[in-house]
Image: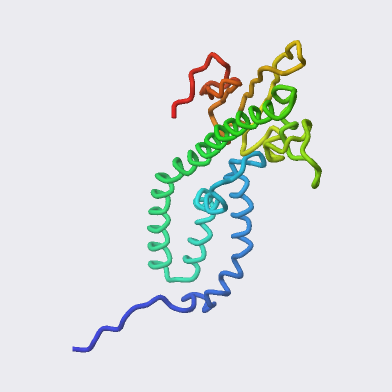
Amino acid sequence: MATPPQTRLPAKSASTGWPWVVWMAALSPLLLVFILISWPLVSYHGHQCTDPGGPGVHLIVSSPLWMPYLYILCRLHWKWTSGFILPLVAYLVFLVVWAEAIPGLLRSPIAAHQASAVGSLRTINTAEFTYSSTYPRGFSPTLPALGPPPGNAETTASAAGLLDDVLAGGRKNGYTFAYLPGPKDSAGRITSYTVVARPLDGSCGTNSYFTDKSGVIRMTEENRPATAKDPPLSY
């Protein structure tokens, strides 16, 4: 018996004879349109939050918007059966995987921002006690006073070099840090302080945090600043 011929996808389109690379070049403006539409829609961090997931997160989240480009490319290149069924099945499978994976991908950056905020509060607490033991002023009058001095200058009470310039500026990884010094005693020393960390928006985090000279970090899930009355953070 004669061996039946093997079927394989043609190197050129059955209808036009155009090579694959020509179709890709011809439809590249369409891909650009999908990218321009999808990128702002899935840049849920906007310009406010750091993106720990990197471009890969954007690429996966935006896939349902740019996958039609691949479908059109395959449909034009292959015959009707292979050019319709195979991309359609692949597209549907991808949508199922996307629907399962995206909620977790969206939660992961939020959890990372919240963990970073807690770590920043611990850093501020450590910096405050180092400051109070170094300078005869008690705790720092402002958060920038804990930041680095300009250039190669020596550290001073106004630029103690205990925090990086980002955190000393009161905003880091999608959270703002509001520092409030307490009243001065009779010797002019600041004897207390509070710090409240709040997310810039819901895409950066959902928890607000509070800490003071006790070193205890407190948290609330309500849309308000955390206070000393909120429960301590559970580790």
Picture quadrant of residue 22: bottom right
Q: Nearer the viewer, residue 225 or 133?
A: 133
Relative height, residue 2 to residue 44 (above, below): below
Identity of the residue furthest to the left in this view: 1
Residue 136 drawn at (x, y percent): 74, 24
Residue 7 drawn at (x, y percent): 34, 78
Relative height, residue 50 to residue 27 (above, below): above
Residue 25 in view, yes or no: yes
Q: Nearer the viewer, residue 85 or 213?
A: 213
Residue 167 drawn at (x, y percent): 67, 36
Residue 203 in view, yes or no: no
For the point 69% across and 39% down, the residue is 166
Identity of the residue furthest to the bottom in this view: 2
Question: In the visual, does 145 lie left or right of 26?
Answer: right
Question: In the visual, does 197 lie left or right of 156?
Answer: left
The C terminus sits in image quarter: top left
Please, which colouring scheme is shown? rainbow
Question: In the visual, does 134 lie left or right of 206?
Answer: right
Relative height, residue 10 to residue 214 (above, below): below
Residue 5 drawn at (x, y percent): 30, 83
